[in-house]
């Protein structure tokens, strides 16, 4: 049962005597450019079906969230906050329509913006973050799966076996991050496999391979955590005090994530739960209350008979 | 510009060129009225943090209701059997078997791959209430079936008595475990209520089984059914109150909107049913009406609880606000694990 709040070796705990190091993702959102190459690479490699083309109005985010057919999701957040020492390059004092009327032959002195004009330095930043299954140390989805379809791989990741899943749907509300979901026309549950097939062949997952900025970094979790720690320090020194890690702490409510993140704002801003807890942590208490409630019912029934006079 | 806006009527309501980045347009979904003023919190475009339950209605709330009625009816049937209340015994045992059969059908129907139902029994997994429930039903179902068959036909009384005892022993667990089933999720209203929900569920099961007994039993055998309904009503109401007090804002969906209405209606019907059965104990019609009311009460509260859970998963507020509060508490130096989430 995954209720302990101590760092563990998930693959070893699942019975792999001799296993490769735990592999994971470190997603450094500070260098994400929102190109969605990860989303595309994931869909292509894993043959994830098309799931509609909606224009949501949520900045550049048209996939909305993780689900059965979205295993990488790039979030876009527009904020009125300064962006470290960078210049966001906005020109709020310019009316682009007036400029357009003016025609293309604007003389540089009267032009509102030229490639060399310094920006107004307005407070604006655009956060982008590529979300994915966290491959939790204590994975609720795996704990509650009644068929054993969800399992722990030798790499410490969490994978659904689609030939066993019977679509009971239990894993879906159990996940504290809203990752796994049911594919409607198929009935089964689907999510990121951390490219289990590629890992077996010594390849890195498709998203990490495709990421042009190395925002998605793949590797042994220990190394990633070290590197992430150094990156946060570097950012703090560079004057970005709000840089923080999310999911890297082995003492958090899920025992740490196999896929963790470097964020520039509170987790909920990106759609993450601020303090997720694996639901099965409370399962022993639940079973105790179930047992005592069952006993209460039995006792109540006995009392119901004792309290009824014969013939009534 | 004016002309353009008139052409595209809907543009009027949009912020268009004056839109501020990073500022929510503040459009609310229709018909939603917060019960208490919105607590200050941030979310990603108001989208839910969780992927809510995909369990369908009426399958799953129907299962919660009928499974409870079945489990408690088996206990009622065994008591009636032991005390020689034969008509009550037959009614409770057949009722239990009927209810568990239909609820099992509902469970299988709810699966994305019903043909793979038996995969539930591939493993034995105490961390999965659904797996444990499947094993429990595997033990309980045949007992309830044999008990009912023997009671109706009068054949094989020894085996019938044994099966009756088996069903009575496993019945309360069938009625109670479904609380762990829903609580063992990240759905705030279900998870955080994990301490009281088992009592709410068994209370509601007793209400339903009492109602079923009242519907079928003759005057001189109805006493235990009436008492069971009374016991169930008191247990359910008391546990529910306790849960609401402890959960604070997370209990909102249990009181507001349609789910809240169902819970409230269920409580009122349970009280009315018990009162009707007590005051009109000599009247066949009053008993039948009360019995039907009690059954409906049990169904309504299970439906309400089911729907309230879905509401609490859909609104990011119920996920984010308590977690934020917990973090703040931890920063202040407390242990940060509030009542709802302590491993107790
Ligand atoms: S993030 Fe959700 S789906 Fe992924 S391993 Fe954790 S609980 Fe399972
Ligand atoms: S839907 Fe499939 S993977 Fe999810 S809990 Fe059920 S059987 Fe397991």
Image (spheres, coloured by chain):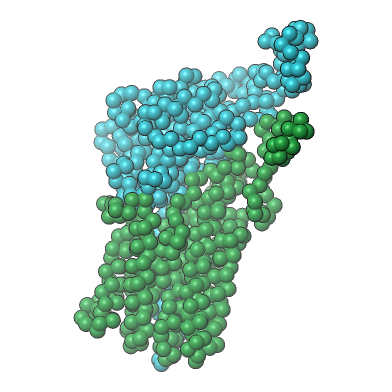
Q: Where is residue A247 in the image (x, y as percent from the top left)?
A: 49, 35
Q: Where is residue A307 in the image (x, y as percent from the top left)?
A: 45, 85
Q: Is residue B227 visible?
A: no
Q: In which quarter of the image is residue B42?
A: top right
Display colour for chain A: cyan
For residue A79, side relative to residue B142 (left or right): right
- What count of labels does the image hold? 0
Q: Position of residue A291 (x, y in %)?
A: 40, 64
For residue B240, side relative to residue B183 (left or right): right
Residue at x 61% of width, y 55% of height:
B249
Between A245 and A189, the residue placed more toward the observer is A189
Residue at x 66% of width, y 47% of height:
B28
Up the image or down, A113 lies above or below A127; here it is above
Q: If the image is split into quadrants, where does the C terminus of chain A sit?
A: bottom left
Up the image or down, B78 lies above or below B342; here it is below
Between A162 and A112, the residue placed more toward the observer is A112
Residue at x 40% of width, y 59% of height:
A287
Up the image or down, A115 lies above or below A58; here it is above
Display colour for chain B: green
Q: Quadrant of residue A11?
A: top left
Q: Where is residue B10 in the image (x, y as percent from the top left)?
A: 69, 40
For residue A100, side relative to residue B307 (left or right): right
Residue at x 25% of width, y 82% of height:
B153
Q: Can residue A167 be seen in this view?
A: yes
């Amino acid at each position: 049962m995954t209720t302990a709040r101590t760092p563990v070796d998930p693959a070893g705990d699942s019975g792999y005597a001799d296993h490769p190091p735990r592999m994971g993702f470190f997603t450094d959102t500070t260098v994400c450019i929102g190109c969605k190459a990860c989303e595309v690479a994931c869909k292509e490699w894993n043959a994830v079906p098309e799931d509609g083309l909606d224009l949501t109005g949520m900045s550049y985010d048209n996939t909305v969230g993780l689900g059965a057919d979205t295993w990488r999701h790039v979030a876009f957040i527009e904020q009125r906050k300064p962006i470290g020492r960078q210049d966001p390059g906005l020109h709020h004092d310019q009316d682009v329509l007036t400029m357009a009327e003016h025609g293309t032959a604007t003389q540089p002195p009267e032009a509102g913006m030229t490639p060399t004009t310094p920006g107004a330095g307005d407070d604006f930043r655009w956060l982008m973050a590529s979300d994915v299954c966290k491959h939790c140390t204590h994975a609720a989805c795996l704990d509650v799966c009644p068929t054993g379809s969800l399992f722990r791989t030798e790499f410490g990741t969490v994978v659904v076996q689609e030939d066993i899943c019977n679509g009971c749907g239990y894993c879906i509300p159990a996940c504290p991050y809203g990752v796994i979901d049911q594919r409607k026309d198929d009935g089964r549950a689907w999510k990121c496999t951390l490219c289990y097939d590629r890992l077996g062949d010594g390849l890195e997952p498709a998203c990490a391979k495709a990421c042009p900025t190395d925002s998605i970094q793949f590797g042994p979790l220990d190394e990633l955590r070290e590197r992430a720690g150094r990156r946060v320090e570097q950012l703090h020194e560079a004057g970005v005090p709000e840089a923080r890690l999310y999911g890297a702490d082995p003492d958090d409510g899920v025992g740490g994530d196999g896929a963790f993140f470097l964020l520039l704002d509170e987790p909920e801003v990106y759609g993450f739960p601020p303090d997720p807890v694996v639901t099965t942590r409370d399962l022993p208490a639940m079973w105790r209350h179930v047992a005592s409630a069952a006993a209460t019912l039995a006792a109540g029934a006995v009392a119901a008979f004792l309290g009824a006079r014969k013939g009534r | 510009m004016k002309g353009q806006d008139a052409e595209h009527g809907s543009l009027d309501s949009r912020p268009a060129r004056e839109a501020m980045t990073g500022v929510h347009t503040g459009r609310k979904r229709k018909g939603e009225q917060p019960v208490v003023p919105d607590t200050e919190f941030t979310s990603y475009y108001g989208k839910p943090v969780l992927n809510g339950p995909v369990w369908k209605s009426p399958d799953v709330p129907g299962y919660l209701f009928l499974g409870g009625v079945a489990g408690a009816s088996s206990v009622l049937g065994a008591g009636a059997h032991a005390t020689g209340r034969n008509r009550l015994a037959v009614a409770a045992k057949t009722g239990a078997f009927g209810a568990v059969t239909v609820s099992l059908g509902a469970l299988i129907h709810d699966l994305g791959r019903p043909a793979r139902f038996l995969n539930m029994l591939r493993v034995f997994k105490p961390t999965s209430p659904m797996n444990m429930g499947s094993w429990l039903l595997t033990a309980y179902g045949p007992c309830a079936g044999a008990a009912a068959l023997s009671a109706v036909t009068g054949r094989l009384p020894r085996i019938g008595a044994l099966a009756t005892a088996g069903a009575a022993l496993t019945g309360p667990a069938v009625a109670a475990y479904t609380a762990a089933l829903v609580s063992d999720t990240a759905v705030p209203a279900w998870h955080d209520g994990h301490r009281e929900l088992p009592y709410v569920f068994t209370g509601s099961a007793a209400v339903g089984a009492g109602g079923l007994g009242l519907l079928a039993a003759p005057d001189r055998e109805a006493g235990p059914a009436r008492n069971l309904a009374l016991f169930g009503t008191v247990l359910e109401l008391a546990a529910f109150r306790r849960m609401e007090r402890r959960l604070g804002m997370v209990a909102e969906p249990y009181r507001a909107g349609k789910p809240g209405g169902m819970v409230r209606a269920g409580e009122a019907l349970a009280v009315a049913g018990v009162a009707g059965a007590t005051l009109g104990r000599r009247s066949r019609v009053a008993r039948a009406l009360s019995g039907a009311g009690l059954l409906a009460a049990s169904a309504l509260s299970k439906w309400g609880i089911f729907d309230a859970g879905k509401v609490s998963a859909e609104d990011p507020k119920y996920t984010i606000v308590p977690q934020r509060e917990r973090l703040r508490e931890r920063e202040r130096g407390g242990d940060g694990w509030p009542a709802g989430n302590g491993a107790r």
